[in-house]
Image (cartoon, rainbow, N blue to C red):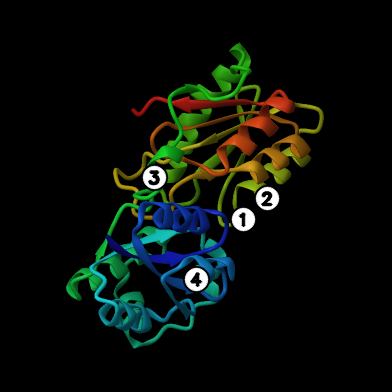
Amino acid sequence: MKYGIIAGNGRFPVLALETARTQGDEVVVFAIKEEASPEVEALAAKCYWISLGELGKLIDGCKNEAISQIMMAGQVRHAKIFSNIRPDWRLAKVLLSLATKNTDSLIGGVQQVLLNEGIELVDSTLLLKPLLATAGAMSKRKPDSDERRDIEYGRKIANALASLDLGQSVAIADRACVALEAMEGTDAMLRRAASLVEGKRLTLVKASSRRRHLLFDVPVIGPVTIDTMIATGTTAVAVDAGRTLMLDREELQNKANAANIAIFGMEPE
């Protein structure tokens, strides 16, 4: 099968490409210059380097390569999406048509332009289904009763936050919401939360239920998440089962177990 991947930063696109290679799939990468690792070029059947805002170049590349399905893999930092874009005429038309300038609206507009050109935006996790979080405990230690109460409360807050397209994560301490994620990302949010409640342990809750699809902005945790949790006194993390990618899963779980951190998959609502 031949796919296209729009590659952002992090391990997500690298793992997707490695999986595609083992499955014999041909993948053409459209690597975002401001975000993607040079590593993706070596793993791709072919690689086009494009800047944020070059929608026309993306479409032309897909047509040149006869690509009808493309997926987004990896993060593009939200702050860059709206501050660093130099749009070509195709993207400028999308931006001018937006009623609200948030990620959902922007990607939705781009998705429609791609569809009009015969290019379908498909599930970002298509090549990485085995890496999706499972329900229940995914670490040796299960959340204790206090952490479970924080998870239950935090999920309500995280879902409300996600429904506004502001972020995916919240930091909870003793059933109080300490910090909400916005454009800064989960790690920066946790560091801010730790500075506000010195000496108290934190619980991290990530939600994805604001949309039924996994076309973009899929929640991700990995070894770096655990490193940040250790540094900030965050003792448990809860994610949506079946809708969150566990990158470098073995290393992630080993680090969590060594630090006595609980990882928990929440059943879909």
**The C terminus lies in quadrant:** top left
Please name the residue that numbered disc 4 is placed on: 82
The residue located at (50%, 53%) in the rendering is 15
Residue found at the far bottom of this picture: 89
Amino acid at circle 3? Ser
Distance in Å between CA atoms under marks 2 and 3: 21 Å
Q: Residues within 10 Å of mark 1 (few under 14, many from 20)?
A: few
Q: Give the vertical position of 161 relative to 58 (above or below).
A: above
Which residue in the protein does label 1 denote? 184
Residue 188 numbered tag: 2
Label 2 vs 4, first from the N-terminus: 4
Q: Amino acid at mark 1?
A: Glu
Q: Position of residue 263 (x, y in %)?
A: 58, 27
Circles 1 and 2 in contact, beta carbons < 8 Å: yes
Q: Is residue 17 above or below residue 119?
A: above
Q: Kindly identify the amino acid type of the residue bearing the numbered disc 2.
A: Ala
Question: What distance separates the C-alpha of mark 2 from that of mark 4?
Answer: 19 Å
Q: What residue did someone put label 3 on?
A: 163
Do the numbered discs 2 and 3 sit on residues whose CB atoms are within 8 Å?
no
Q: Quadrant of the N terminus?
A: bottom left
Residue 62: where, in percent of width, then height? 30, 76
Q: Which mark is residue 84?
A: none
Q: CA distance from mark 4 to mark 1?
A: 13 Å
The answer to whether mark 2 and mark 4 are in CB contact below 8 A is no
Which is more toward the observer, 258 or 184?
A: 258
Among numbered discs 2 and 3, the one appearing first in the sequence: 3
SS state under label 1: loop
Q: Residues within 10 Å of mark 2 (few under 14, many from 20)?
A: some
135 above or below 248? above
CA gap, disc 1 to disc 2? 6 Å
